[in-house]
Amino acid sequence: MHEFLDDYQQIVATLPEEDVEPPPLPKLQAITPRQRPREILLVEDNEADVRLIREAFREAGSSHHITVAHDGEEALELLRGTGLFGSAPRPDLIILDLNLPKKDGRQVLAEAKQEAILQRIPVIVLTNSNAPRDVRACYDHRANCYIRKPLSFDEFIATVKSIEHFWLSEVLLPAA
């Protein structure tokens, strides 16, 4: 070890004694994941929850566009661009309730994740159910997260704001 230190000191002694400043580091550019307002598909049959979710996005300063489907069949038509929704833009994010008329959210999730063009759209399940079988089924069908709807108004608003912040401000989403 002593020989190593001697060699090191000899090498250091041969280096020029200049006051050379290292070149400045390049400035980093801020990268913002959302370059444009995002398209959100909200699949929710409860009009009070629709209003709360819209209000939470507004309070978060969001400029994203929210399209609402009130039942599972309407959601799938909108996602596939069929029926009345032939010109609807494909969403960047889906917020999905499970308990829906016509076709429930579990079926919507399963069908959407089987179609190649829809598979990459993140799906956030936001529901009243905390049943383990629902949680398991949603993750089995590749939901991106499962959130139980909070019971208090303030917690509900905070939860939706956290969805907006994480999924639409932090996460890089694939192009629609």
Image (cartoon, rainbow, N blue to C red):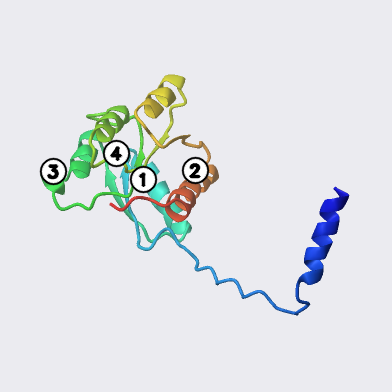
Mark in front: 3 vs 1? 3
Q: Farthest residue toward the right?
A: 2
User: Which mark identifies residue 156?
Assistant: 2
Q: Amino acid at mark 2?
A: Phe
Work out how far the residue at label 3 is from the one at label 4, CA to CA, in angstroms.
Answer: 17 Å
Q: Earlier in the sequence, mark 1 or mark 2?
A: 1
Q: Position of residue 135 (x, y in %)?
A: 43, 26
Relative to the observer, which residue lies in front, 162 or 170?
A: 170
Q: CA distance from mark 3 to mark 2?
A: 32 Å
Q: Secondary structure at mark 2?
A: helix
Query: Alpha-carbon neighbours of circle 1 within 10 Å: few (<14), some, or many (≥20)?
Result: some
Q: Identity of the amino acid at label 4?
A: Gln
Of badges 3 and 4, the one in the foreground is 4
Mark found first going from the N terminus, 3 or 2: 3
**Between disc 3 and disc 1, whose residue precedes?**
1
- Looking at the rendered structure, the secondary structure element under dot 4 is loop
Q: Secondary structure at mark 3?
A: loop
Q: Quadrant of residue 139?
A: top left
Question: Against 90, is 112 above or below?
Answer: above
Q: Position of residue 110 (x, y in %)?
A: 28, 29
